[in-house]
Image: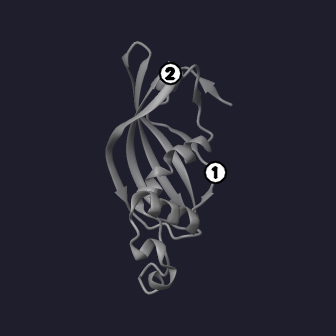
């Protein structure tokens, strides 16, 4: 595991800091997300009706795709910060859903470090550009700027 200090990571602002493994987005994952959020729109959960749409089948919820960020980050080759006590989501600057993720497709995350600042001693805030690529497709599923904080 590639472990770095916050200051070492700070030197990489503007660089891609990781690419994840591919992860399959299954219909079971989509159905579970629908149950958790109450969003049972047919384009997500009814394969027969969804076949009749321009999507040609069911698609993942945009927010499901966005919520894969922690999983994809965990499966990325990005550097890990030494001695982190905890991390928290702080928010997002922008999120754009660019292409649907069809059930059964594989996705991966690309992570680019945009900002990293120490807000208080031991409290760091980072902004990551998070791109979700769809295997075999030119257009990404989404691009988001996500803000998180970690404490060392």
Residue sitting at 54 percent across and 22 percent down?
84
Please provide percent x and percent y for residue 53: 41, 83
Please provide percent x and percent y for residue 121: 40, 12
> In the image, is 139 to the left or to the right of 108?
left
- For marks 1 and 2, give the CA distance: 24 Å
Please provide percent x and percent y for residue 3: 63, 25
Mark 1–mark 2 contact, CB under 8 Å? no
Residue 29, placed above or below residue 121: below
Please provide percent x and percent y for residue 31: 51, 66
Question: Quick one: which residue is furthest to the top in this view?
Answer: 121
| Location of residue 28 (image quadrant) | bottom right
Residue 46, placed above or below residue 77: below
> In the image, is 96 to the left or to the right of 79?
left
Residue sitting at 48 percent across and 59 percent down?
33
**Sequence-earlier tag: 1 or 2:** 2
Residue 57, placed above or below residue 20: below
Figure coloring: one colour
Residue 120, placed above or below residue 99: above
Q: Is residue 129 visible?
A: yes
Label 1 sits on a secondary structure element that is loop
Residue sitting at 43 percent across and 63 percent down?
61
- Tell me the residue that label 2 is attached to: 6
Q: Tag on residue 21?
A: 1
Q: Is residue 140 visible?
A: no
Residue sitting at 50 percent across and 26 percent down?
86
Question: Quick one: which residue is furthest to the bottom in this view?
Answer: 52
Number of numbered discs visible in the structure rendering: 2
- Mark 1 crowd level (few <14, some 14–19, many ≥20, 10 Å Cα): some
Q: Tag on residue 116?
A: none
Question: Quick one: which residue is furthest to the right in this view?
Answer: 1
* Image quarter of the N terminus: top right
């Amino acid at each position: 595991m590639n472990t770095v200090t916050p200051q070492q990571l700070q030197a990489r602002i503007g660089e891609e800091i990781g690419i994840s493994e591919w992860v399959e987005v299954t219909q079971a994952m989509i159905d579970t997300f629908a149950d958790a959020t109450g969003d049972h729109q047919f384009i997500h959960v009814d394969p027969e009706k969804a076949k009749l749409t321009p999507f040609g089948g069911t698609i993942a919820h945009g927010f499901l795709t966005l919520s894969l960020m922690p999983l994809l980050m965990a499966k990325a080759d990005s550097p890990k910060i030494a001695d982190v006590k905890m991390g928290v989501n702080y928010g997002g600057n922008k999120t754009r859903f660019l292409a649907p993720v069809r059930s059964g497709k594989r996705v991966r995350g690309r992570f680019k470090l945009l900002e990293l600042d120490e807000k208080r001693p031991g409290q760091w805030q980072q902004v990551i550009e998070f791109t979700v690529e769809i295997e075999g497709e030119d257009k990404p599923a989404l691009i988001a700027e996500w803000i998180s904080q970690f404490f060392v």
